[in-house]
Amino acid sequence: MIFADAHLHSNPVSGLGIEKIAKRFKSLGGWFMALVSLPPTHYGLQQDRDGYVKAIDITIAECRKARSLGLRVACFAGIHPADLEKLLTRHMADPRKVLELSEYVLREIARRCQEGLLDGIGEIGRPHYTTRPEAFVINELIMNKALTLAKDLNVVVHLHLEQGGIVTVMDINQRVETLRLMKGKIILHHLDYKTAREAVRYGLPFTIPAKYPLLKHAFTHLEPVYMIESDYIDDPKRPGVAAYPWDVIEIQLTLLKEGVVNEEYLYKLNVDNIVTVYGVEPP
Ligand SMILES: [Zn+2]
């Protein structure tokens, strides 16, 4: 059995860093990971142009290291919706300045996609918590810009969204149609069951977090059209906030042993769907 983690982060400044993560993940059967940038502040950087560019380049270096350790990697950089939200609400930044900063960061990301250093844009989207309405609107403006950019660059996008079930999925599906995007490249990340069920209905690719009850329910109720993620944030101060990448493997093996799922189903999630969505070479 081989396993993929379809969305995680690493932090070489204050966390384990990719070397430790990749070695342990690979030793347990991991073959692929989609590695996503963290906000600059996680790396001890400022939330400005320079901080973002450095954060993107830290992510690229981490992806390179993971590849050198024998993993297939899809490398992503974005502007987390919570980042823009914080700039507006906590730092009372001028919305025009926030837009300018975001557009600058997207240009830097696009350039690195063209150079083959990044494989996609993410995560971007909307906050999943209550905040000022403007924080949603500014994120939507940037999300649309990023989606259009991704289409031009022919790259994958990771969307971080509220878990709104049908309304979340309908909204993204409508954007796919009006902006004429490639449906197969827009990944809805970290879905709960009710939103996942709608994503299946609309044919949008998605990931679900590796939690035992959720996986158990998904394995028994959903077609094997999705992928599994740890959403590990590699922050020693918040150890329980998301699963470890090895939990992704552990939980699937447990459910396999319990007879909840079979190997064929798991192969689709961990290999077939990864190869299709991320366009990587199969193992
Ligand atoms: Zn994430």
Image (spheres, rainbow, N blue to C red):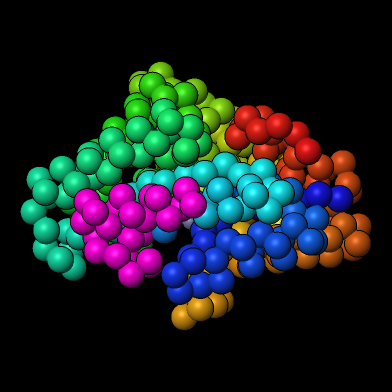
**What span is in magenta?**
39-61
Q: Is residue 66 above or below residue 183?
A: below
Q: Is residue 205 left or right of residue 141?
A: right
In the image as oriented, which residue stretches furthest toward the bottom? 237
Q: Residue 165: in sight, yes or no?
A: no
Residue 231 occupies which quadrant of the picture? bottom right
Residue 227 against residue 107 in the figure, above or below: below
Q: Tell me the residue at 87%/57% (across/down).
A: 256
Quadrant into which the C terminus falls: top right
Residue 74, how many percent across, how many down? 57, 42
The front one of 54 and 98 is 54
Numbered circles on residues, count: 0
Q: At 31% from the left edge and 39% from the top edge, which residue is drawn?
A: 108
Q: Where is residue 114 drawn, in percent x and y?
A: 41, 28
Q: Residue at x 61, y 63 (%)?
A: 19
By secondary structure, the bulk of the magenta-drawn segment is best described as helix
Residue 266 in sight from this viewpoint: yes
Q: 276 or 164, which is in the foreground? A: 276
Classify residue 40 by image quadrant: bottom left
Q: Position of residue 122 (x, y in %)?
A: 43, 45
In percent of the image, x 86 and y 50: which residue is there?
1
Q: In the picture provided, is 212 more to the left or to the right than 166?
A: right
Q: Is residue 198 above or below residue 43?
A: above
Near-viewer residue (86 or 112): 112
Please give left or right for residue 156 compared with residue 162 in the image: right
Q: Percent x, y for residue 115?
A: 43, 31
Tell me: 79 left or right of 214: left
- Magenta-colored stretch includes residue 144: no
- Verify whether residue 41 appears in magenta: yes
